[in-house]
Image (spheres, rainbow, N blue to C red):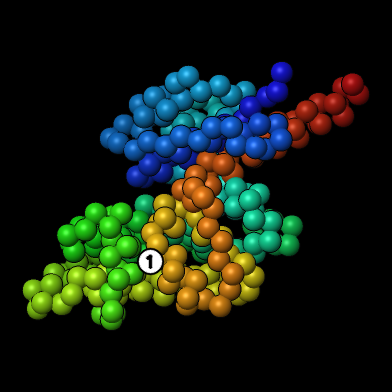
Amino acid sequence: MSRQYAGIDIGSRTIELVVVSEAGEILQSLQTDTGFDPMLEVNKLLSGVSYDSIMATGYGRNLFEISFDAATVTEIKAHAGGARAIFPEIRAVLDIGGQDSKAIALSATGKVTKFEMNDRCAAGTGKFMEIMAKTLGYTIEEFGREALLAENVVTISSMCTVFAETEVTTLIAKGQDCREIGLGLHSSVIRRVIGMINRVSPSGAIAFTGGVANNPCMAALLAEQINRKIVIPDKPQCMGAFGAALLAREMECKSEVKNTFITGE
């Protein structure tokens, strides 16, 4: 019977689960909100899901390791592995999640060679975008669509969430168009992440992953402002879980080869 491998990405905002076949094909893909009790949501997500081996990634991976006695992998390696499996030509991955953003450089063979990570402040993360959207009166789904409709861009001077929120509130009070403010906020984030990408990987195609890759304004500005090919998977927020599932499969294969070598079977 064909074996199945699962990867679970326990993020700050959402949890993704992907199950792949022995051939690496996606058999199942699920998502839920992280909530106040991540392990409770994990158990709900795994209920009724069949797999032979599982690997966890994301900020909650250590909790999962304790609860399920399972292997874990960093988000950097997971997103790199997942994106590379879909787009073999990429030389970098930009992953923007809820609490951090990561620029990851890959070798010609797909190995992680260098990375830069912003995890000390909300600037350039999904949380920053969520707060700014709420300040402007948009849902997170509306934010990017509305910003793309702006005729002009308003320059935002601060990337600190607290100061940026104050600046946005002041601009609204002065009657500035919310779409133009929104475009300015998106542009500020893009300038920050492009700097990260160029420092770790100056050339080659880039895969844009993480939940923020679903934002159409972010995707459009990134493609417009960096002179490199940008590719986005159908479910960018699932790339970490997909990569973890592929690594679970790889780990089992290596273990089988090792055991065969030792026993001579």
Q: Residues within 10 Å of mark 1 (few under 14, many from 20)?
A: many
Q: Is residue 78 left or right of residue 17?
A: right
Q: Left or right: where does residue 179 sit relative to residue 2?
A: left
What residue do we see at 68% from left, 61% from top?
89
Q: Up-down: is 15 above or below 223?
A: above
Vertical arrangement, residue 192 with respect to residue 31, above or below? below
Question: 194 and 77: which one is in front?
Answer: 194
The image quadrant that residue 129 belongs to is bottom left
Which residue is painted at 50% across and 35% down in the image? 29
Q: Is 124 left, or right, of 17 in this rendering? A: left
Please name the amino acid that badge 1 sits on.
Cys
Residue 226, position in %: x, y? Answer: 52, 76
Q: Is residue 223 visible?
A: yes
Q: Position of residue 162 (x, y in %)?
A: 21, 65
Residue sitting at 56 percent across and 78 percent down? 227
Write the residue at 35% across / 26% down.
40
The residue carrying mark 1 is 217
